[in-house]
Image: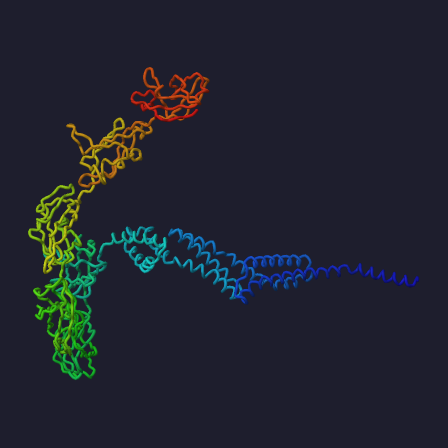
């Protein structure tokens, strides 16, 4: 037994020793377990968070719940941080390896965090704000909201770009970015237009830079048209701003000379910003109003002819001699007009002409009917007018050329049309003497064997038809016949070619066969077989028939425009333009009524010297004003039948009324006047206008709103009447204003009295007028409170200090005191320091005070400093 005990003791001792010595080993093992567990826990959570978004987007094609992913990422961050702490506290010698093991999951953690960061950039609030702004229709709010949303979208896209995984990025973009961008883009058109017109208004471009304003308006024309198709409050509001600014732009827009350019020695071009009215390019005597002044040392250009382009935007000046040197193209003040009636801005534009370029051959052409006929004629075309050509060589043979303008014709040829030719032009000279010694162009041969045909036949009046062909005819001759209805008679009187367009003819019908059975007729026009012959000899192979309906003109001529003209800066005539050619009744003044701005009826012949149809435009009647006619605004009435049209049965014009401003440069018609003065006494103001003023309507001198005292407009019940002269007669040059009771709150010896927009009988508007006047308080004092100030005293306080008028004032007819049961209470009164003190038997019994109406306010005893009686009808409780 002892032996066994000894053995057990030995073992126990060894175990004990072993246990004691192994304490550090046991702690190390425990540490390893806690760190590993922390790392495992963190790594597992990181992977869970990462896979929640990555696998969900990749495998299911959906975004995970925002709440769920935020929760998992938050736990992952917490576990990761806990693991880091655990490593720091218990990692011992293995800290580096533990850290490396933990950081293996850091990439996944950062990716999960980046996903949460992306979805944390919310677009919903910005989209809602934009929706609300659009609904409100406020352009500024929409722009602000759209800008905020776009900024948020950019922030979101930046965050999404950091998200790992193309599926996640694609789904985030599809779910959030795409609809947000679509919502923002939905108002891009509106905001583009708004920004442009906001800039126009902000920079006041219509006043400061009209050209820039026009460029901006043009830049969004397409977008404005888009907005017109939209039915929204926002679009409607923007279009209102567009319309307002466009009208202001159009009103400010005047035609200007954009450029004056020397084309060559024969030609100067003047380009305008908008179309010019051709009729205003000549004066009454037919002379050109835009002139060319020769500078010192410059060549005499000879006669300069002018031609306006079809679009009205280019005026071509042609010299009969040549331009060489310095010239000034002068546009006069307020004579030339645009089609909208606005004057072309005057300008003196210098241009230097020094043509040193020789004429260039641009083409050599020939048109033939058939190659077997050969080439008989060749047309040479140059880039400018030529005056001579020495010779033309074709296949070594010399030919003469007939020169006209920028073209030259070679005739009497007999060339094989199946061969190629080079045409050599020798010594082509322009008007400036520039010579091109030799230049070559290939001959271009065109075959035209098509027969001429009638393109259209269109009614051009009651008895006229415009017939248009597809090519010019030989000898400018159209053989055509016509019939009306069932009549067999020939109704074509003549067919005349249009000198400016030789493919067009005016066919005149015989009046006697028209409108016998109504107000319209069907005309059958016929061109016989082979009657149409073009310049190459091609003929129509069969008869051509066209029908056209002509209608009787039963519509009266209508005035469409009134315009004035000046001579030496003064309006000396005006014109009325109708929508068709007219004839003036004789005598014209018999159907003209005219009054001046004062409403005085004038004799027409004293205002209009003559009225006659313009020589240049049969639609326009020119009224020449009487010599020495005063500058003024004249109202004209043209009676029915003042003009008739040129219908087969003439139609009378309807009555037409209009105004004409006769002005003179430096001496404009007066539109305003100065008020002579104003004075006041006892709150009665007398205004001397110095001229008769209106009693009713706009600008009436009897309208209280035309007057102010200390910035306050007179009330509508103000008594205003015309003054009277010394004889007691009405004087319409003066008004007397009695300020109503209660209008003046306090005495003021320096009140500011203003008068605005009063008009004289001839519509002149008063200039700004201010006068310092004295006014007196005419506001009745009002009871504000009653207070028992002693056992037998009641003090009454007013809105201002009062006094008791009269030697023995009795105010029992002005004030009533009652107790709580309505029984009257007797009192005596005195004034103390601007207040009313009433003596009664028992002040505690007084319940209320009532101010009574006095039959004659002049007999009132309770008054203010200006003897204005107290306000009656007030009841104030104690």
**Quarter location, residue 370:** bottom left
In the image shown, does 94 or 691 lie closer to the viewer?
A: 691
Query: Residue most toward the left?
Result: 587
Rendered image quadrant of residue 349: bottom left
Quadrant assignment for the C terminus? top left
Q: Is residue 228 left or right of residue 759?
A: right
* 351 left or right, relative to 16: left
Across and down, in percent, residue 634 comes to 15, 45
* Lateral position of residue 109 relative to residue 597, left or right: right
- Most foreground residue, 838 or 172: 838
Image spot of residue 699 (x, y percent): 23, 39
Q: Quadrant of residue 469?
A: bottom left
* 791, 712: nearer the viewer: 791
Numbered-mark total: 0
Tell me if 804 is positioned left or right of 733 in this view: right
Which residue occupies the extreme top position in the image?
808
Residue nearer the viewer, 402 or 286: 286
Above or below: residue 598 compared with residue 745: below
Residue 733 percent location from the top left of the image: 18, 34
* Residue sitting at x 19%, y 41%: 763
* Residue 544 visible, this angle: yes
Tell me residue 240's x, y (percent): 32, 52
Q: In the picture, which quadrant includes the N terminus?
A: bottom right
Q: Is residue 523 above or below residue 720?
A: below
Q: Is residue 88 above or below residue 633?
A: below
């Amino acid at each position: 037994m002892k032996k066994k005990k000894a053995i057990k003791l030995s073992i126990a001792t060894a175990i004990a020793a072993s246990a004691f010595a192994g304490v550090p080993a046991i702690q190390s093992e425990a540490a390893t377990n806690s760190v590993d567990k922390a790392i495992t826990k963190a790594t597992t959570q990181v992977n869970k968070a990462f896979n929640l978004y990555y696998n969900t987007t990749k495998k299911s094609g959906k975004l995970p719940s925002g709440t769920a992913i935020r929760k998992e990422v938050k736990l992952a961050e917490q576990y990761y941080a806990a693991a880091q702490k655990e490593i720091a506290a218990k990692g011992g010698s293995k800290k580096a390896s533990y850290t490396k093991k933990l950081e293996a999951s850091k990439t996944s953690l950062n990716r999960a965090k980046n996903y949460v960061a992306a979805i944390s950039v919310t677009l919903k609030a910005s989209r809602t704000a934009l929706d609300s702004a659009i609904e409100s229709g406020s352009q500024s709010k929409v722009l602000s909201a759209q800008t905020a949303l776009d900024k948020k979208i950019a922030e979101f896209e930046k965050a999404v770009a950091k998200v790992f995984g193309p599926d996640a990025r694609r789904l985030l973009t599809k779910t959030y970015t795409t609809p947000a961008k679509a919502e923002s883009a939905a108002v891009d058109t509106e905001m583009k237009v708004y920004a442009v017109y906001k800039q126009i208004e902000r920079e006041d471009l219509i006043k400061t830079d009209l050209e820039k304003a026009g460029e901006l308006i043009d830049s969004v024309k397409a977008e404005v048209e888009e907005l017109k198709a939209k039915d929204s409050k926002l679009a409607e509001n923007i279009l209102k701003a567009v319309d307002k600014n466009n009208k202001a732009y159009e009103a400010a827009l005047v035609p200007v000379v954009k450029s004056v350019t020397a084309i060559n020695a024969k030609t100067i071009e003047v380009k305008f910003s908008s179309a010019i009215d051709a009729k205003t390019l000549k004066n009454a005597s037919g002379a050109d109003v835009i002139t060319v002044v020769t500078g010192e040392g410059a060549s005499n250009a000879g006669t300069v002819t002018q031609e306006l382009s079809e679009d009205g935007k280019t005026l071509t000046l042609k010299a009969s001699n040549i331009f060489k040197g310095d010239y000034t193209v002068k546009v006069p003040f307020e004579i030339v007009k645009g089609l909208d009636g606005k004057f072309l801005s005057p300008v003196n534009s210098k241009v230097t002409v020094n043509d040193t370029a020789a004429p260039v051959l641009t083409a050599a052409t020939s048109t033939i009917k058939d190659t077997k006929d050969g080439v008989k004629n060749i047309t040479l075309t140059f880039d400018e007018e030529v005056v001579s050509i020495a010779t033309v060589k074709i296949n070594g043979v010399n030919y003469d050329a007939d020169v006209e303008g920028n073209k030259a014709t070679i005739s009497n040829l007999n060339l094989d049309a199946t061969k190629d030719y080079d045409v050599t032009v020798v010594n082509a000279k322009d008007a400036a003497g520039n010579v091109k010694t030799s230049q070559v162009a290939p001959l271009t041969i065109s075959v035209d064997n098509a027969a001429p045909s009638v393109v259209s036949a269109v009614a051009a009046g009651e008895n006229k038809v415009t017939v248009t062909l597809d090519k010019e005819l030989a000898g400018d001759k159209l053989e055509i016949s016509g019939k009306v209805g069932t009549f067999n008679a020939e109704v074509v009187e003549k067919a005349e070619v249009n000198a400016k367009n030789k493919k067009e003819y005016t066919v005149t019908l015989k009046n006697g066969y028209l409108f016998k059975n109504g107000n319209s007729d069907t005309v059958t026009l016929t061109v016989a077989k082979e009657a149409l012959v073009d310049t190459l000899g091609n003929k129509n192979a069969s008869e051509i028939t066209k029908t056209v309906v002509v209608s009787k003109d039963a519509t009266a001529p209508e005035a469409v425009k009134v315009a004035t003209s000046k001579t030496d800066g003064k309006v000396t005539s005006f014109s009325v333009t109708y929508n068709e050619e007219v004839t003036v009744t004789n005598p014209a003044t018999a159907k003209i009524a005219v009054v001046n701005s004062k409403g005085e009826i004038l004799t027409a012949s004293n205002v209009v010297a003559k009225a006659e149809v313009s020589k240049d435009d049969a639609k326009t009647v020119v009224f020449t004003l009487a010599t020495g006619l005063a500058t003024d605004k004249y109202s004209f009435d043209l009676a029915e039948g003042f003009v008739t049209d040129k219908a087969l049965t003439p139609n009378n014009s309807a009555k037409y009324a209009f105004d004409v401003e006769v002005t003179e440069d430096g001496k404009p018609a007066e539109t305003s006047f100065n008020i002579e003065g104003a004075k006041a006494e006892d709150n009665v103001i007398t205004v001397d206008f110095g001229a008769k003023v209106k009693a009713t309507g706009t600008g009436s001198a009897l309208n209280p709103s035309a007057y102010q005292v200390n910035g306050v407009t007179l009330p509508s019940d103000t008594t205003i009447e015309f003054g009277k002269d010394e004889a007691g007669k009405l004087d319409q040059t003066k008004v007397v204003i009695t300020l109503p009771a209660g209008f003046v709150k306090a005495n003021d010896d320096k009140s500011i009295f203003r008068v605005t927009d009063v008009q004289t009988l001839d519509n002149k508007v008063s200039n700004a007028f201010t006068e310092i006047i004295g006014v007196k308080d005419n506001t009745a004092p009002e009871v504000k409170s009653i207070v028992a100030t002693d056992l037998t005293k009641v003090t009454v306080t007013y809105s201002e200090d009062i006094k008791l008028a009269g030697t023995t004032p009795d105010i029992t007819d002005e004030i009533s005191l009652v107790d709580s049961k309505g029984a009257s209470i007797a009192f005596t009164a005195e004034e103390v320091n601007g207040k009313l003190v009433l003596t009664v038997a028992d002040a505690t019994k007084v319940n209320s005070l009532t101010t009574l109406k006095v039959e004659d306010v002049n007999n009132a005893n309770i008054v203010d400093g200006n003897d204005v009686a107290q306000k009656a009808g007030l009841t104030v409780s104690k």
